[in-house]
Amino acid sequence: MHRSIRCAVAAVLVLAATLLGQDPPPKKLGLPPGLGVGQPLVLLAGGIATLQVPPGMKFLDIAATARIREGIWGNAPDATVQGMLVKDGFDPQAEGRFGVTVHWQPIGYVDAAEWQNLDAEALLAAWRGQVEAGNAERRTRGEAPVEILGMAAPPRSDAAKSTATWAKRYRIGQDELIAYESRAFGRNGVFVFKATGTKDQLAELAAASELVVSRLSFQTGQRYADVAPSDPRGRLEIATGIAKGVWEQLPTFQRILLIVLALSALLGLVRLIARLFGR
């Protein structure tokens, strides 16, 4: 009896190990039924703003967006995500599919000087510095590094609408991609609308992203023009990256050399002051 039980348990373990070692068959994972239906107007960030869902599109909530971004596309969790807009009939596994992801960054009021007249070369330098830092970790996981190729659309801003847009070209392995971003600035932060696709989809990504941002409305008291002198100020996320990026993309030996030169200059200044006051 005991021998039969042991044999049965062994057989089950062998079968389980075999199944676990096999790749699961590809399964088409569609959207939960009814998502987006009856939601022509969506409240975002606890009611700070409303978004009118464009005709022919659906709004996916945070949970449904995570199911796609993290579960299917393999993105890391992002606490800033508020949802995603997709076209009717959207299949997250279909070739050429994309969504416009909605992010809320409660960073405070960002002065116009931070986001108007942005310099394309400065943006590229910041992105390259940030990407290079992340590539070290990607290599340890056996993943292809990310390479910033250039601007797909130059940065531009609209002071009247308090918006800014740009797009960058980048490569992961053999895939060349476009990331199109639109930003809408409010009194206490910024909404970011991101659409990513292939290089042949630039016009489609731009149209979708800019359509969505045009249908965002901050509530009264939360608009960019409603700022008060006592409101906390913030820095544009990418602007902070610009300041750090130049330093981060320097090799270690160049950082050490700069520190040594700075210390040498400081020591020379101390000696000069000592001679002047020692007379």
Image (tube, grey):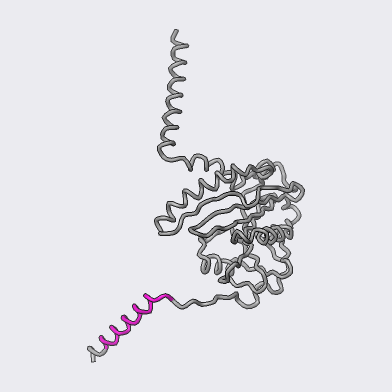
Residue 22, placed above or below residue 253: below
Question: How many numbered discs, if any?
Answer: 0
**Measuring 52% from the left and 60% from the top, which residue is drawn there?**
175
**Measuring 71% from the left and 62% from the top, which residue is drawn there?**
51
Q: Residue furthest top?
A: 279
The answer to which of 96 and 278 lies nearer the viewer is: 96
The answer to which of 269 and 156 lies nearer the viewer is: 156
Residue 219, placed above or below residue 277: below
**Measuring 68% from the left and 41% from the top, which residue is drawn there?**
113
- The quadrant of the image that shows the N terminus is bottom left
The answer to which of 191 and 56 lies nearer the viewer is: 56
**Measuring 55% from the left and 69% from the top, which residue is drawn there?**
67
Is 21 in the magenta? yes
Q: Is residue 179 left or right of residue 277?
A: right
The stretch in magenta equals: 5-23
The quarter holding residue 30 reads bottom right
Q: Is residue 157 left or right of residue 277?
A: right
The quarter holding residue 63 reads bottom right
Q: Main secondary structure of the magenta part?
A: helix
Residue 149, placed above or below residue 73: above
The quarter holding residue 47 reads bottom right
Q: Position of residue 66 (x, y in %)?
A: 55, 66
The answer to which of 220 and 192 lies nearer the viewer is: 192
Is 255 in the magenta? no
Q: Position of residue 53 (x, y in %)?
A: 71, 66
Q: Position of residue 132 (x, y in %)?
A: 48, 48
